[in-house]
Image (cartoon, grey):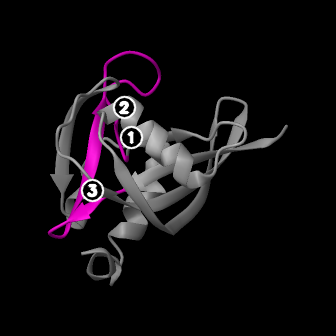
Amino acid sequence: MSTRLSLCGIACEAGRYLVARRNPGGSQGGKWEFPGGKQEPGETPEQTLVREFDEELSVPVAVGRRLFVGAFTNGTNEYRLEGWEVTLLSRDFHLTEHQELRWVPPAELGQLDLSDSDRGVAEALAGPGTVESLS
């Protein structure tokens, strides 16, 4: 079994992180997550995040540095999860796979019904010094 790469974009403004609540249905329906998705063959992490933010939120982004590396399993598939800093270049959101967006301070991330894959990202962001380095 090969490990696939999944990427999430970490947008931070005024000490708050952007999270999105998935549309109902499926195993992750209604769960909160950091927007992103699976890397397609031949894509760089930056290309994946630009494509995913366009597909899911209809906004362009600039991708910065990698902030998080973890792993998760979904069914029989294993994934390496990377969280990358993103800067939103527009706020003209058009949601396709999500029902809601929210800017959340790090201390409140753990109170959300996050997808299991994104819990590690939230815990890392709630750690000391992370918000200051992104704000």
In the image, residue 24 lies in the stretch drawn in magenta: yes
Q: Identify which residue, 53 or 72, lies in the foreground.
A: 53
Mark 3 = which residue?
Answer: 109
> In the image, what residue type sits under mark 1?
Phe
Name above or below for residue 20 compared with residue 123: above
Q: Residues within 10 Å of mark 2 (few under 14, many from 20)?
A: some
Q: Residue at x 48, y 47 (%)?
A: 49
Q: Which residues are magenta?
A: 10-34
Q: Residues within 10 Å of mark 3 (few under 14, many from 20)?
A: many
Classify mark 3: helix, strand or loop.
helix
Quadrant of the rendering where the C terminus is positioned? bottom left
Give the Cα separation between the discs numbered 2 and 3: 21 Å
Mark 2 = which residue?
Answer: 56
Image location (x, y in percent) of residue 90:
21, 47
Tags 1 and 2 touching, CB below 8 Å: yes
Residue mark closest to the camera, 1 vs 3: 1
Classify mark 2: helix, strand or loop.
helix
Dot label at residue 53: 1
Image location (x, y in percent) of residue 52:
45, 38
